[in-house]
Image: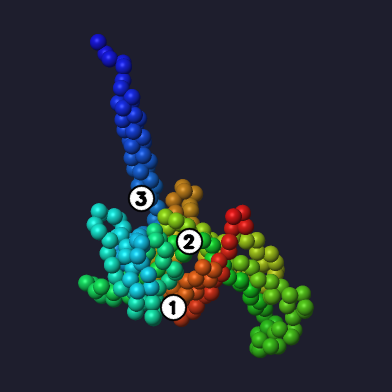
Amino acid sequence: MTNHNFHPLQSMAATLIVLLLALAGCHQESRRETAATTVPAAASNDNTIYGLACEGSNDTIIIFLREPYTGANPDTLSVLRAMQSKQVFGKINTGDRLAIMKSQEGSTEAELVIVTERLLGTWCYLQKPMLRQRADMEGMTEEQVLESLPDSVRQLLETALEYGFTLKIDSMALPIWHQQQNTGTDSPIEYPPIKLYRQWCINNGHLLLIQSITDSAGVSQFIGQDTASLVMLKDDSLVLSFGTEQQSYYRKHDTTE
């Protein structure tokens, strides 16, 4: 005879097993979706150490648990020289995610520390348009071109739009969209194209901003990436170096907060 009188603990255990199986199925589905994308992940030669800041970290040392967590005790590294050389980006609070570069393997010093928690959010800068070149401008200096323009066009050249990106948790990124007015083929001005950043990651102490588009089949297609070095990271300001060029950003706070 089948016994239908389940003990409450048995029922809870059965429910837990079902939930775990469902989560496993979701995980497998997520892995299949990730495999379908053509957007590259971080390079396999990444020597960055990732961890969570522990209580006791200060301007001299950082105490952190390595990620992924293996059960090991926290590590301790000196950050005094990194602080002095301004290579610690973001204020470190307990529980923050960190990206760390050692000065060399086996060293007890951190050469660079990025508090990746502080990178999350929307970063903007103001971008002015450029003047479309016309045949009648050939041979004219920039000053002569500006003098020949009507006031209405000069005003358009001073109309700046917000450019930038949003960095989200789990390496997601979003470009800042806006309506570019007066930029048709007949317009005297044009704005630079928007960078279609969809993913981001830290790689060997650099910020990788990955551009992609989604095709008709829903698969992300890689179209390029930009590598930036951090120059400054504060609560409301960020400066990135793209090769020989630097770009300053301000943090745009969510007005719904």
In terms of depth relative to the viewer, which is nearer, 241 or 210? 241
- Which residue carries the number 3 mark? 35
For the point 31% across and 17% down, which residue is it? 5
- From the viewer's perspective, is residue 192 above or below residue 27? below
For residue 25, say whether it is visible.
Answer: no
Q: Is residue 169 left or right of residue 136?
A: left
User: Mark 1 packing: few (<14 Cα in 10 Å), some, or many (20+)?
Assistant: few
For marks 1 and 2, the one nearer the N-term is: 2
For the view shown, which residue lies furthest in the right direction?
Answer: 151
Instruction: Give me the C-alpha separation between circle 3 and circle 1.
Output: 31 Å
In terms of depth relative to the viewer, which is nearer, 217 or 242? 242
For the point 38% across and 73% down, which residue is it? 59
Q: Position of residue 209 (x, y in %)?
A: 44, 65
For residue 34, say whether it is visible.
Answer: yes
The quadrant of the image that shows the N terminus is: top left
User: Which residue type does callout 1 highlight?
Assistant: Gly
- Which residue carries the number 1 mark? 243
In terms of depth relative to the viewer, which is nearer, 71 or 180? 71
User: Which residue type does callout 3 highlight?
Assistant: Ala
For the view shown, which residue lies furthest in the front direction?
Answer: 56
Q: Position of residue 215 (x, y in %)?
A: 48, 52
User: Mark 3 packing: few (<14 Cα in 10 Å), some, or many (20+)?
Assistant: few
For marks 3 and 2, the one nearer the N-term is: 3
Instruction: Give me the C-alpha separation between circle 3 and circle 2.
Output: 25 Å
Q: Nearer the viewer, mark 1 or mark 2?
A: 2
- From the viewer's perspective, is residue 132 above or below residue 173? below
User: Which residue type does callout 2 highlight?
Assistant: Leu
Q: Position of residue 33 (x, y in %)?
A: 39, 47
For the point 38% across and 80% down, which residue is it? 84
For the point 24% across and 57% down, which residue is it? 72
- Which residue carries the number 2 mark? 120
Q: Is residue 4 left or right of residue 191?
A: left
